[in-house]
Image: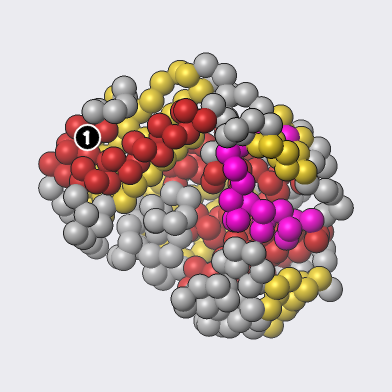
């Protein structure tokens, strides 16, 4: 049994998600302690508990500690069981993070899987639906597995109630990732989404973006009786990679401020010259470890990334290397 200290490094939910995914993939029993100990509300929240139960469902695992606020879990997986599954968080917790927990196992299963996931679809501090669909999954598709992701219903914090569906067509193996150059810039697009809020908020965000970015923009008005929501998304498309940058409307924060924060992130990425942004770097680590080879160039690896690497290396017999290659670029390789 592998024991993982959930308080080590970044100490958040990613430690739990990666550990569960790799436990299933390798067939190794897992004990994880001090779960999310570095967070204000430690232990399993609703989205983490849903991810744990989803991981158990697809692997027939024996689980001890599957309850809210639990700080310790024992997980003994069986064989991966592809099929049709539905999982509902019951809060605005991220449905996308539940998908992240079980996707690695299902993308190497011996059959297609159909998933329906309910919860938040566009949450701060987690990859929104459009990020997974447009940035991560196209890179995964180059390596073999194909995932068709569909947004059935928007879900914003704090109301939630969103729904995504996924069809996972697995591959017998994972190809080698080499993403060291972004290629030519193909275009920049911006989308401002408003739910149960005035459309002028989106127009102000797009107008402010246009002051510093040369981008086409559109407004999407969502008729959602569950509650208000606002997200601003900028999609940057290069020949070899697409990145998605998001900002969320908040009470007391102007639309202009939201837009300037997103524009600053986009400009920082463009100026860096690296193909892989901070969050995509996290997503690519498990596929690269499963392939046993590969590399990508990114900005300075975050604590989130280095913690994820430490977890992965405890399950999979690979060694990651991080090498600084210029003032603003690092190469991560297996």
Q: Residue at x 66, y 69 (%)?
A: 8
Can residue 228 be seen here? no
x and y percentages locating residue 105 in the rendered image? 71, 54
Quadrant including the C terminus: top right
Q: Is residue 226 left or right of residue 20?
A: left
Quadrant including the N terminus: bottom right
Look at the image and give the residue range highlighted in magenta: 295-313
Q: Residues within 10 Å of mark 1 (few under 14, many from 20)?
A: some
Relative to 59, does residue 287 appear above or below in the rendering? above
**Does the magenta run of residues contain 36?**
no
x and y percentages locating residue 195 in the rendered image? 22, 51
**Does the magenta run of residues contain 312?**
yes
Can residue 302 be seen here? yes
- The residue at which mark 1 appears reads as 208
Viewer-side residue, 54 vs 48: 48
Viewer-side residue, 241 vs 85: 241
Q: Residue at x 61, y 81 (%)?
A: 71
């Amino acid at each position: 049994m592998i024991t993982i200290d959930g308080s080590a490094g970044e100490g958040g939910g990613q430690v739990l998600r990666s550990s569960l995914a790799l436990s299933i993939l390798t067939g190794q029993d897992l004990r994880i302690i001090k779960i999310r100990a570095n967070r204000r509300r430690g232990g399993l929240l609703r989205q983490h508990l849903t991810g744990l139960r989803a991981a158990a469902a697809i692997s027939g695992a024996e689980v001890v500690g599957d309850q809210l606020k639990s700080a310790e879990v024992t997980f003994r997986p069986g064989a991966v069981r592809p099929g049709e599954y539905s999982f509902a968080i019951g809060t605005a917790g991220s449905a996308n993070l539940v998908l992240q927990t079980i996707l690695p196992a299902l993308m190497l299963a011996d059959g297609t899987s159909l998933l329906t996931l309910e919860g938040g679809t566009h949450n701060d501090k987690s990859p929104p639906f459009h990020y997974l669909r447009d940035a991560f999954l196209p890179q995964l598709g180059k390596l073999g597995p194909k995932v068709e992701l569909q947004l059935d219903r928007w879900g914003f914090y704090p109301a939630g109630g969103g729904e995504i569906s996924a069809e996972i067509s697995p591959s017998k193996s994972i190809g080698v990732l080499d993403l060291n150059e972004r290629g030519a810039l193909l275009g920049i697009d911006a989308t401002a989404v408003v739910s149960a809020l005035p459309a002028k908020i989106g127009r102000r965000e797009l107008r402010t973006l246009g002051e510093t970015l040369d981008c086409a923009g559109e407004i999407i008005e969502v008729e959602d009786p569950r509650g208000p929501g606002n997200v601003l998304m900028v999609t940057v498309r290069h020949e070899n990679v697409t990145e998605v940058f998001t900002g969320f409307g908040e009470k007391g924060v102007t639309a202009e401020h939201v837009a300037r924060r997103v524009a600053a992130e986009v400009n920082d990425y463009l100026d860096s010259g690296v193909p892989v942004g901070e969050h995509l770097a996290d997503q690519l680590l498990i596929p690269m470890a499963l392939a046993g080879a590969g590399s990508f160039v990114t900005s300075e690896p975050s604590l989130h990334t280095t913690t994820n690497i430490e977890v992965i290396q405890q399950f999979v017999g690979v060694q990651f290397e991080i090498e600084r290659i210029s003032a603003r670029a690092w190469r991560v390789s297996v």
